[in-house]
Image (cartoon, rainbow, N blue to C red):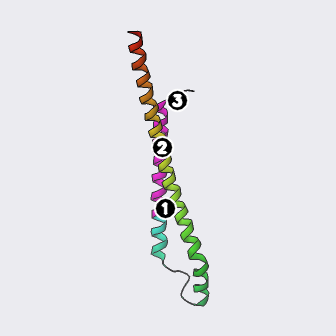
């Protein structure tokens, strides 16, 4: 098995950027929706709509935020693993160099 640490780190940065972009878009969306307020009105039908809509909307936003956090976590994990592999490679090279000496 071969792992190219530099490639993994580069891919992790792209993944992290995608997660950050998703987080920014979620924040913009929730801000825009919040600025609109309760556009369904306060009458009986509007209240009924809100009763069904708001919990689902909150769950959807929460799921999107968790997805952005998960993407960032994956990027961190990939970077940590690549650095670990790089460190092990360096240690093996150093040990082999001493064995040859």
Q: Would you say the magenta stretch is mainly helix, strand or loop?
A: helix
Residue visible at 53% across and 56% down?
67
Work out whether mark 2 precedes mark 1 in sequence or the reverse, and give the earlier one: 1
Quadrant holding the C terminus: top left
Instruction: Tell me whether circle 2 and circle 1 mark residues in contact (CB < 8 Å).
Output: no
Between 52 and 99, the one nearer to me in the picture: 99
Position above or below: 27 against 17: below
Give the residues drawn in magenta, as a range: 1-27
Numbered disc in front, either 2 or 1: 2
The numbered dot on residue 26 is 1
User: What residue did someone put label 3 on?
Assistant: 3
Q: Secondary structure at mark 1?
A: helix
82 drawn magenta: no
Q: Distance of mark 2 from mark 3, alpha carbons?
A: 15 Å
- Residue 61 as seen in the image, left or right of residue 92: right
Report the residue that reaches farthest toward the front.
Answer: 99
Residue visible at 45% across and 63% down?
27
Numbered disc in front, either 1 or 3: 3
- Label 1, residues with CA under 10 Å away: few <14, some 14-19, many ≥20: some
Q: Distance of mark 1 from mark 3, alpha carbons?
A: 34 Å
Between 39 and 97, the one nearer to me in the picture: 97
Work out whether mark 2 precedes mark 3 in sequence or the reverse, and give the earlier one: 3
- Label 2, residues with CA under 10 Å away: few <14, some 14-19, many ≥20: few
User: What residue did someone put label 2 on?
Assistant: 77
């Amino acid at each position: 098995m071969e792992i190219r640490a530099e490639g993994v780190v580069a891919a992790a940065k792209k993944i992290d950027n995608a997660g950050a972009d998703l987080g920014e878009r979620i924040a913009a969306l929730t801000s825009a929706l919040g600025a609109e307020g309760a556009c369904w009105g306060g009458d009986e039908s509007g209240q009924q709509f809100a009763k069904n809509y708001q919990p689902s909307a909150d769950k959807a936003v929460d799921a999107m935020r968790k997805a952005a956090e998960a993407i960032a976590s994956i990027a961190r994990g990939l970077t940590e693993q690549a650095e670990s592999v790089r460190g092990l490679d360096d240690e093996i090279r150093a040990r082999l160099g001493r064995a040859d000496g």
